[in-house]
Amino acid sequence: MIKENNSRSFIPIAEGYLKSGMVDEAIGVLKAGLQVYPKYLGARVSLGKAYLEKGLIKEALKEFEYVISLSPDNIYAQRKLISIYRNMGRIDEAIKGCDALLLFNPKDKEIISLHSELMKENNPPIHPLTKEGNYDVLTLESGANNDVPPLEKDGTGGYEPSVQEKQEHIIEEFSTETMGDLFIAQGEIEKGIDIYRRLLVRDPDNKSILEKIENYLHPGKVKTKENQINRLQNFLENVERNKRQA
């Protein structure tokens, strides 16, 4: 029926089932619809929600991860993933989800607070020990560190990436055209262009991204400083040069 009608209206039907507590029926409708529209992210989100209602955590996780792989700015999917990862003890991945959300909205107080909680869970305070291997009560009460060096999570005292490096990694991992578009829409022109640049490194012949960059070079479309225009112009020239040399 869905294929014959060439319609994506199956989501309201599924949502109606969910509201009525008919979870199995909702899952059936959504799975049928996704056979026709496998990349319909709204349906994937609804299916993930239905799986959570059913207690099928692994199935829900798979749906939300798929959504994020194509649309990292999907706030609902990111929030659900953070919750699932946290409950599964995968704190590093939960933190990474918070980092991704904070890229789009760095002033989100709820996510900032959650990020802080997760960081504490991931890096519990390390207290000095006595020679017998017990916690030194006097040292704990006095707050002295007893010259014990701080350890990394793995206890090796290894290299800890800076905040900027962590953010760079998150951007690299979640870079999509949608992410670039979102930054542009928020007025973050340089960030949007940077995302497009990363994508062009992977796919130099992507006409959609090339056209977007050229559009933002036009002074009448985006108000930008002259040095920024020159910078972007040089970037485009480098891309074209690399294409010719390939």
Image (tube, helix red, strand yellow):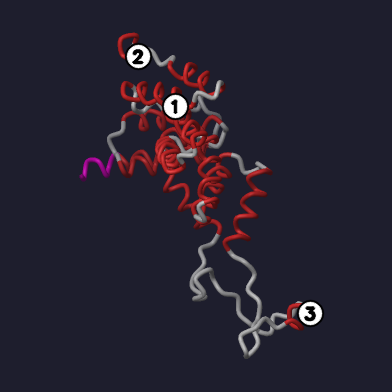
Residue matched to label 2: 2
> Crowdedness of circle 2 by 10 Å Cα count: few (<14), some, many (20+)?
some
Residue matched to label 1: 24
Residue matched to label 3: 142
Residue 23 higher or lower than 123, as above or below: above
Q: Which residues are magenta?
A: 240-246
Instruction: State which quadrant residue 32 falls in.
Output: top left
First along the sequence among labels 3 and 1 = 1
Q: Which mark is residue 108?
A: none
Amino acid at circle 1: Asp
Tag nearer the camera, 3 or 1: 1
Q: Is residue 180 visible?
A: no
Q: In terms of depth relative to the viewer, which is nearer, 211 or 87?
A: 87
Secondary element under disc 2, as helix, strand or loop, is helix
**Distance between mark 2 and mark 1 Cα atoms:** 18 Å
Query: Which quadrant is home to the C terminus?
Result: top left
Query: Which quadrant is home to the N terminus?
Result: top left
Is residue 120 rendered magenta in the image? no
Q: In terms of depth relative to the viewer, which is nearer, 214 or 1?
A: 1
Amino acid at circle 3: Ser
Point 46% across, 42% down: residue: 57
Q: In terms of depth relative to the viewer, which is nearer, 162 or 108?
A: 108
Secondary element under disc 3, as helix, strand or loop, is helix
Residue 174 lies, in percent from the top left, at 44, 44
**Distance between mark 3 and mark 1 Cα atoms:** 58 Å
